[in-house]
Image (cartoon, rainbow, N blue to C red):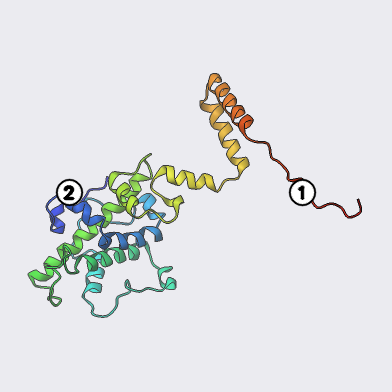
Amino acid sequence: MAIKPAPAEFGVKTEAELLRMILSRSVMLPWVQFRDNNPQLLRVGHHVPGPHTPINNTNKSLSLVMAALQTTAASIYDWPEDSEISKWTVQTHFECLVYKTCKNLAQPNEPFEKPFANAWPRCDTKAYDARVVKVTSVMRLASYLIRSYAESFDRKEPVPIVQRMEDVYPTANLEHSPTFSVRRQAELGKASRKDLIVTVTQLLSEVATKQELIDYIMKMEAIKQTQPSPTVDLTLIKKDPKT
């Protein structure tokens, strides 16, 4: 089960404020990039820190993100080429998500503005530890969102936070949507008419009673009878010059 980070970790007081932050562009834009590049990961939720996994200075991803945030030059996560992204592991995509979210939240008027103000501190200072805490919170948030998406694929309706995120920024490829009805409609849209008829026939034979079948036939026949017959404009038919 996905465990949501506490609002206080992001400098807000209520769940409503935390939700607004999650749905903001600062969080959603890096998330959308991650989500649309990793559709299969979001179906299983593996390869990310678990809800009870401690995230500390020994965590490799945390160390890499901290190093990337500290550098004054562009990191590997900033403007990667498609050829580079194609070689990334799931963990690299996860680190990129955390890195970009942290950078956005450290901007003016954002939750992490104060902890990330001024020059990068030495590793043995409270200021450095404060930044570690914030990066850790973003890692926990990212893990929570990934696992929430994975849970949604096993449900008829997505979990509430996923539904809100999809309302704001829907999944680009509808076949990978965490919403079952959206995903199923996209799958059916690729099927041939013949395959759809087979599917309908199978469903009717499995779940419909005799009376329901009769009602369905009557309804379809009524629709067919009300449809106008195709007409042909004879003036548009070219005559054979030999006749």
Pick the front one: 84 or 106: 106
How many neighbours does mark 2 have within 10 angstroms: few (below 14), some (14-19), or many (20 or more)? Answer: some
At 46% from the left and 50% from the top, the residue drawn is 175
Amino acid carrying mark 1 in the image: Thr
Q: Is the C-beta separation of discs 2 and 1 under 8 Å?
A: no
Q: Which residue corresponds to mark 1?
A: 235
Q: Which residue corresponds to mark 2?
A: 15
How many neighbours does mark 1 have within 10 angstroms: few (below 14), some (14-19), or many (20 or more)? Answer: few
Residue 125 percent coordinates (x, y): 8, 72
Rendered position, 59 above or below 237: below
Residue 196 percent coordinates (x, y): 58, 40
Residue 98 in view, yes or no:
yes
Pick the front one: 205 or 52: 205
Q: CA distance from mark 2 to mark 1?
A: 70 Å
Is 72 on the left or on the right of 118, as rendered? right
Rendered position, 216 above or below 66: above
Identify the image quadrant of the N terminus: top left
Helix, strand or loop at label 1? It is: helix
Rendered position, 181 above or below 79: above
**Residue at the right extreme?**
242
